Image (tube, helix red, strand yellow):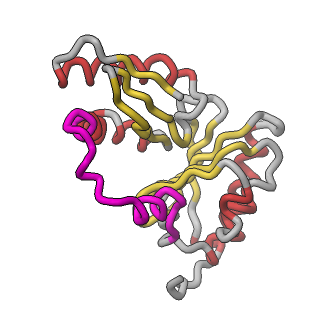
Amino acid sequence: MKAQIPISADDIMIRAQDTPNPNAIKFIINFSLKNTGNATFTSKKQCESLPLAATLFDIPGVEQIYFFQNTLTLTHAEELPTEMVKENVRAVIKARLSIHDPDFESLEQIAQKEKPDRSHMSLERIEIEDILDRTIRPGLQSDGGDVEVIDFENNVVKIIYQGACGGCPSAMMGTLDAIQSILRSEMKNDQIIVVPL
């Protein structure tokens, strides 16, 4: 871990934004939370080495935390009113940001380092990833979410939504239809079906 630049709570600016998922709130901070890639946590145990993330799970009803660049998206189960969740998150960020390491590696990044060369991935799977990178992911990431392709076989694309997209009604309907339409059009294959896991 690199030496952290001292950050005063007064220097931290936080803007909360609603997302298409009514149970997810996106927080935009004027400091980086994740310098490379993104990270999703669904339990305190997964992020014990990250005090900022771990403390957020102490807020009643927090189900998922997603870090991407200078944004944090938190999904909650409405145990507290949304405004109270926002106040609690702001307090945690102001208290813990000074000891947060934005260069931390997510479990996925660590796993990717351990994986062998992915050159064995099918050409179709590589094409799907490229299409999503170009068309779908930027919009999802700007709303505090993302999509991961798990498998492509027999014209079925299996995906997992991340961040604010997990459990979002918009992701399950409109976004799913958009992904399927784009893939069918760009790959010139009307048989493609996208299935969320």
Q: Position of residue 145 (x, y in %)?
A: 49, 41
Q: Is residue 185 left or right of residue 150?
A: left
Q: Is residue 8 above or below residue 125?
A: below
| Residue 120 magenta-highlighted | yes
Q: Position of residue 113 (x, y in %)?
A: 40, 65
In the image, 54 versus 84, the foreground residue is 54
Q: Is residue 139 above or below residue 172?
A: below
Identified at 71% across, 66% down, the residue is: 48
Q: Is residue 103 above or below residue 2?
A: above
Q: Position of residue 194 (x, y in %)?
A: 40, 21
In the image, 114 versus 67, the foreground residue is 114
Q: State the residue lying farthest toward the top.
A: 190
| Residue 86 magenta-highlighted | no
Q: Is residue 187 left or right of residue 197?
A: left
In the image, 33 versus 117, the foreground residue is 117
Identified at 16% across, 18% down, the residue is: 188
Which residue range is magenta in the image? 104-127
- Name the magenta segment's main secondary structure: helix
